[in-house]
Image (spheres, rainbow, N blue to C red):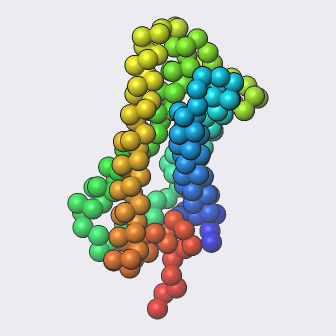
Amino acid sequence: MPVKNTEKEYGTISKTLHWLVLVIVITLLAIAAQSTELPRGEEKLQLILLHASFGLLLLFVLSARLIWRWLNVTPTKMPHIPVWQHVVSRTVHYGLYLMLFVQIFNGMARFATAGYKVPFFGLFEVGLPMQKDEALNELIGDLHGIFPIVILVLVGIHILAALYHHFWLKDDTLRRMTTGMKAEE
């Protein structure tokens, strides 16, 4: 399996970053779901700080993924796929990138408008140049709860498309981001 992308498939680094983003997003959702159920207190605060740290980790990994994507060749489009499906695929991919970055900065803004910086696993803190503002903090908090729904819809479309290609069309779309292309027959 090549380290860099080829015309046929994604390389090890692209695949690793892709799946690492998924693991971090699942972790963020699980921590958020758990912390929502807790009353105010130390345990909830620790989960919020952990959630924020994973949010920053997502920012770093997602940024690395985009940079790596720009520096590498993208595997060629599969010729049997209609143009409209390529358009939908690009829209979903760009939508995912956009919404993930929006959600990350929304979370950072939530911290900033509460008067805090975002911690990174106790190693350092990152802040945004925003003033403390309770009303804005509440609005940002509401949006921070709504945006994951949009992200989950986009992820759902992405997964369904991959499964459609793998099981219905029986092409290499999913394999290009997992185990690699099947051997030429």
- Taking 157 as reference, is 61 above or below it? above
Residue at coordinates 44% horizontally, 30% vertically from top-left? 144
Q: Position of residue 95 (x, y in %)?
A: 37, 44
- Taking 161 as reference, is 95 above or below it? above
The answer to whether residue 20 shows anywhere in this view is: yes
Number of labels in the image equals 0
Looking at the image, the residue that sits furthest to the right is 123
Residue at coordinates 61% horizontally, 57% vertically from top-left? 16
Quarter of the N terminus within the rendering: bottom right
Residue 5, quarter of picture: bottom right
Q: Nearer the viewer, residue 169 or 77?
A: 169
Residue 89, quarter of picture: bottom left
Q: Nearer the viewer, residue 109 or 47?
A: 47
- Taking 128 as reference, is 171 above or below it? below
Residue 150, quarter of picture: top left
The answer to whether residue 53 shows anywhere in this view is: no
Q: Give the left or right position of residue 143, taking residue 66 as reference.
A: left
Q: Nearer the viewer, residue 69 or 113?
A: 113
Q: Give the left or right position of residue 89, taking residue 135 as reference.
A: left
Residue at coordinates 35% horizontally, 70% vertically from top-left? 164
Looking at the image, the residue that sits furthest to the front is 39
Q: Position of residue 48 (x, y in %)?
A: 61, 29
Q: Position of residue 125 (x, y in %)?
A: 68, 23
Looking at the image, the residue that sits furthest to the bottom is 185
- Taking 101 as reference, is 181 above or below it? below
Residue at coordinates 57% horizontally, 73% vertically from top-left? 179
Q: Position of residue 172 (x, y in %)?
A: 44, 75
